[in-house]
Image (tube, helix red, strand yellow):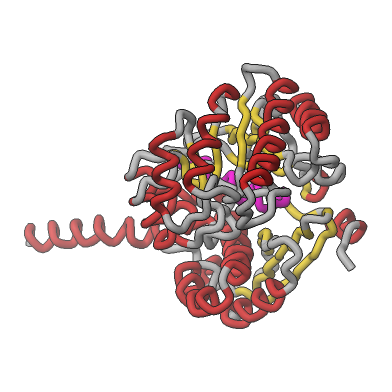
Amino acid sequence: MASMHRRRVLQSLVAAPLAAAAPPPEIAALKVTGLEMFRVKVNRRGDWLLVRLQTSAGLTGIGDASHGRDETTEGLLRRLFDKLKGRGIFDIEWLRREAQPLIRERGASAAVALSGLEQCLWDIRGKAFGVPVYELFGGRLHARIRNYANINRSTDPRTPEGFAQMAARAVAAGFDAVKLAPFDEMPRNLTNAAKIEEFTQRGIDCAKAVRQAIGPQLDLLIDAHSHFDRAHGLELARRFEPLNLFWLEEVTPARPLDDLAAINRAAKMPTAGGESIYGVQGFYPYVAAGAVDIIMPDIKACGGLLEMKKIAALGEGAGLLVAPHGPASPVGNIAAAHVCAGMPNFHILEFSYGEVPWRAGLIDPPEAIAKGGFIELSGRPGFGVELNLRLIREHQAA
């Protein structure tokens, strides 16, 4: 009898945590029922494509599926939603697996579509359990998420004076780190030595003007957008040494990886990159090659929040910092911030500064940036924000 009693006690102890781990029946029964898309006009660089999923209980979740002017993303969202409709809010790994053939076929557009829906599912799950999304990713290590101001999309004219003026505005708005991509006007695959030097010097002059505008203490980040080959990239890193860069980003294309790795070994400043890579499998060879010091998964391009968490863990194992790429809408920015909150190796997050004056009001409550470029995550369920549909309708793309 005593042994039978002990057995029953042990069985009850085993069963209790299993029962506690099961979601309440009303949450487990939640099904995805509807999809809404909102395309918002931003500027010459493209639109913001915002997504909202509806569920059988009336809960909704939001996400960002912006991909420049790529209108094929809307069709890919519908195709993936057709697979997801009627399924539960926990089917994120299932959705990831189902999306793989489409991503192989359609590339970045399909990855962005997957991410947009996946973001919505995490927002819904947080609301269903009454907790912020960061609690679903292991809890919060960072109460505030530091952002740098990417002024590249908002600067006009793209001259040293133009970049300096926009950088000064970003600093006045509270940011203490500024990024620009001053070589975007350089034609791809340029072979004329004199022209290469002309565009290179023009870009360096823009960076010098920004350094002068923000002073020696604040952080300056430069993105080369893969405009250089190995030889010119090595020279570029040397020429940037006097500017005390926070990092130098994507000097050469990712293939061959040996080029980036050679620049990384030689550069006196940290190097960063990986913004267009999809998935943990895509990042593995990038990390293994020693391509950069800081990896930059994009919440949209890499496949979503869970994929970003996996990539961050890969980077953590290799001793690398993670600084998510993302010139995104306020929705994309807050989604990435919730993952960053629980990253042991989080470094800094990208913020697309100055594109439109009404950016902050696109979500409710409005986006708020504290001194130093910090976003403070609230304790509200899900992402803690909703779409401001009135403002969205005012700026809806035709």
Tell me which segment is drawn in magenta. Answer: 328-343
Tell me which residue sits at (69%, 62%) in the image.
67
Say whether residue 13 is magenta: no
Tell me which residue sits at (40%, 40%) in the image.
320
Q: Quadrant of residue 126?
A: bottom right
Which quadrant: the C terminus? bottom right
Is residue 263 in sight in this rendering?
A: yes
Q: Main secondary structure of the magenta part?
A: helix
Question: Left of 209 or right of it: where is 113?
Answer: left
Question: Left of 398 or right of it: where is 317?
Answer: left
The picture places residue 297, in percent across and down from the top left corner, at 52, 51
Say whether residue 338 is magenta: yes
Given residues 360 and 171, the one toward you in this image is 171
Given residues 309 and 18, the one toward you in this image is 309
The picture places residue 295, in percent across and down from the top left corner, at 47, 45
Numbered disc total: 0
Given residues 235 and 157, the one toward you in this image is 235
